[in-house]
Image: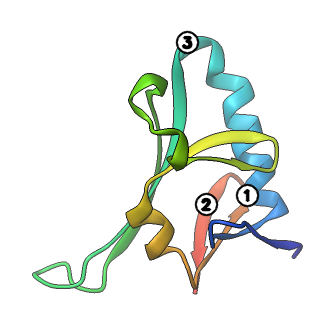
Amino acid sequence: MNLHRHPCGIIYSQAFAEHLADKHQREDGQHVGELLSLDYVRCASGPHAGASWYQLTWVAAASVPLAERFHIGGTLVHIHKQTRNGLKRRGLHCVDGQVRVLT
């Protein structure tokens, strides 16, 4: 597995970068003025403590600060500071179209 460390701290595989590029290419025409947004949430307390999930959605590009826009491979994505912090020691990988968070 070919891994990359992004300057913002996220670790990702080449397969994940290709997954983002593919999703962007397939859906971009339906999301004019929007930007892919990467979210990672890990619950620290409560009934879902320890549970985590990944989400990739489209958000209005005008609402995303320039400091939260990053290129993963050749794809521009929004990565919120909380997501960057949550993924600091984790990696993102894609197998058969399924994104996995590696610990």
Seen in the picture, residue 27 relative to 5 is either above or below; the reply is above
**Which structural element holds mark 1?**
helix
Q: Are circles 2 and 3 on residues that touch, CB within 8 Å? A: no
Residue in the image at 31% along x and 78% along y? 51
| Left or right of 1 on screen, residue 70 | left
Residue at coordinates 53% horizontally, 17% vertically from top-left?
A: 31
Q: Earlier in the sequence, mark 1 or mark 2?
A: 1
- Say which residue label 1 marks: 16
SS type, badge 3: loop
Left or right: 32 in relation to 86: right
Q: Is residue 15 above or below residue 67?
A: below
Q: Are marks 1 and 2 in contact (CB under 8 Å)?
A: yes
Residue type highlighted by circle 3 = Val
Residue under label 2: 99
User: The disc labelled 2 sits on which kind of residue?
Assistant: Val
**Residue lying at 84% horizontally and 61% vertically, measured from the top left:** 14
Label 3, label 1: how far apart the Cα atoms are: 23 Å
